[in-house]
Amino acid sequence: MRTLARQINILDYALSSLWRRRLKNASVLVVFTAVIFLVASFQMVTDALTGTAQEVLVNAPQITLQRMSAGRQVNIPLAYAGKLGAIYGISNIVPRVWGYYFDELTGANLTIMGLDTSRMPMGDQLRLTLAEGTFPAAGSRGSVVLGQAVRDMVRARGSQLLSLFRNDLSMASYQVAGVFSRATDILTRDLVVMSIADARDLFRIPPGQATDLCIYVANPTEIGTIARKIADLLPDTRVVTRPQILKTYRVVFGWRSGFGSICLLTALTAFVILAWDKASGLSLEEKREIAILKVLGWQTADILAVRFWESLLVSGLAFLLGVTLAYVHVVFLDGVLFRPVMVGWSVIFPPFHLAPAMNAQVFFLIFCLSVLPYLAATVIPAWHTATVRADSALSGA
Amino acid sequence: MMRPAHILLLVLIVLLAADGFLLLSSAHRRARWREQDRLRAIAVSGLGLTDLCVATEARYTRHPAVTDLVAPFMDHPGAMDHFPSGSFWAPPPRP
C-alpha cells in the first residue's frame, strides 16, 4: 500500500513536470502520435485487404492456364484443352474470354468477362449474387450482368442499354439483365459479364481461341502435381494455381511496396530523431532539476522512476491515440488518406468498407517498435545524470 | 482540487472506453461482413475470379495474380510504371 502511494506521488510529480514543459512535450506527443497513426493505418489497411483476399479467393479457379508468347500473355487455342485430356485427374476445363475495356467518356476501365457460367462450380447459384434482375441463361446473346459502378455509368447516360465499341469502332449494345449486389463490390464493381460468344465478338477473338482456361481437378490435393504435368506438356503456357494466387495476395499488400517503404522509412526516421534527441543527453535545466532533487534527499531510483513515468506517459498516450485514430481513419473514413495512392487514377473503385481484424500481434509489434525504444532512450541518459553526485552536477551547471 | 494522477486516470478511462467501443464496432462489422461470405464465394466460384477489384487503373493492379511479372514496363520501350497504385502494391512472388 505504501509503495503504491509512493508511486502515485511520483506519478503526480512526473505529470507536474510534464505540464511545466508542456509545449515541448505536446509537440513530441503530436509527432509520436502521427508516426504511430501512419504505421498503424498502413498496417490495418493492408491487413484488411490481405485478410479479405485470403477469405474470398479461396474459391478461385484451381488452375488458370495462360499461353505466353514473346514474354506476353496471348490468346490460348481451345485445342490445348483437348491436349490436357491425357492428364488423369482433371475434371473440368472451362475457357474464358476476358479483357479490359477503356471507356473514353468517363475514363473508366471495365473488366469484360465472357464465359459459360453453367460449366463453372456454383455457376447455377450466381443469381443469388444479384441485387436486381436475373442471370441470363447460358449462351444467351445480347444480355449482360453489370457491377454496381458500371450500372451507375449506364444510368448516368440515361440509357437502358450498355453500348461498347468493338476494335473497328462499330458499336455493340447489350440489354442489362442484372446487377451484382453491393456485397460483392470488392470483386465485381467494374465487371461486365456476358456470354463467351459476345465477348469474342466484342474483342474480335477467333472462335477457336480463349483468353485463358480454368481447370478443375477431382482431388484438390493434386493441384500442384497436375499443374507440373500441364507445364511439362504445354511448355509455352503459364500455369497459375489457386495456392499461388493466395500466396500473391499474402505479399502484394505489404511493407515492400514503394508506398509501404516510404511509410516505414518516415516512421523510422521520426523515431530515430526522437530517440537521438533524448539519448543525446538531458538539457541543463533537467540536469539541475535532478541535482536539486538529489540534494533534497531523492534516491537515484526515485529520479529514474520519475523519468520512466514521464516517458511512459508520453509514449503510451501517443500509442493509444495513434492506434485509435488509425482505426477511425481506416474503418470510419475508409482509409481516405491512402486512397489516392491505393486506387491511383482509377475511376471505378470499391467503397472500401474495410473491416480489419483487430490483431493483437500487430499492436504488440507497433508497441515494441515505438514505446520501448523511447523508454530506453529516455531512461538511460537520466540514469547517467542521476548517478553523478549532486554537488558536482550543480557546480557543473 | 483533483490530483494530476486522477486527471490522468480520467483521460485513460475515456480513451480506453473509446477503444472498447471501437473494438465492439469492429466485431459487429466483421459479423455483418461474414453474413455475406456466401455471396462472395458464389461470385468467385461461378465466374472464376482471381483478383480483388481494388484499383482498376492498370491491369497489373487490377489482376496482379494473373498478370505478367514485367507488365509495368512492357507496354512499349521506356514505358515506366506511371500509375500511382503501382507504388502501393508490392511485386507478386515469383512462381
Image: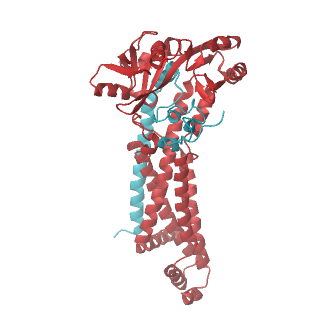
Above/below status of B54 relative to A229: below
Residue drawn at x 64%, y 26% as measured from the top left:
A238
Q: Tell me: A233 left or right of A354.
A: right
Residue drawn at x 51%, y 71% as measured from the top left:
A6
Across and down, in percent, residue A371 comes to 54, 60
Above/below status of A1 relative to A124: below
Q: Which quarter of the figure has residue A219?
A: top right
Across and down, in percent, residue A1 comes to 51, 66
Q: Tell me: A234 left or right of B42.
A: right
Residue drawn at x 40%, y 33% as measured from the top left:
A348
Identify which residue, A186 or A183, lies in the foreground: A186
Identify which residue, A161 or A61, lies in the foreground: A161
Q: Which quarter of the figure has residue A162?
A: top left
Question: In the rendering, what colour is chain A?
Answer: red
Residue drawn at x 49%, y 50% as measured from the top left:
A40
Colour scheme shown: by chain
Task: Kindly tell me whether residue A189 is visible in this rendering.
Answer: no
Which residue sits furthest left?
A: A158
Task: Kindly tell me whether residue B55 is visible in this rendering.
Answer: yes
Q: How many marks?
A: 0
Across and down, in percent, residue B82 comes to 49, 43
Identify which residue, A371 or A263, lies in the foreground: A263
Across and down, in percent, residue A325 comes to 42, 51
Chain seen in cyan: B
Above/below status of A68 relative to A316: above
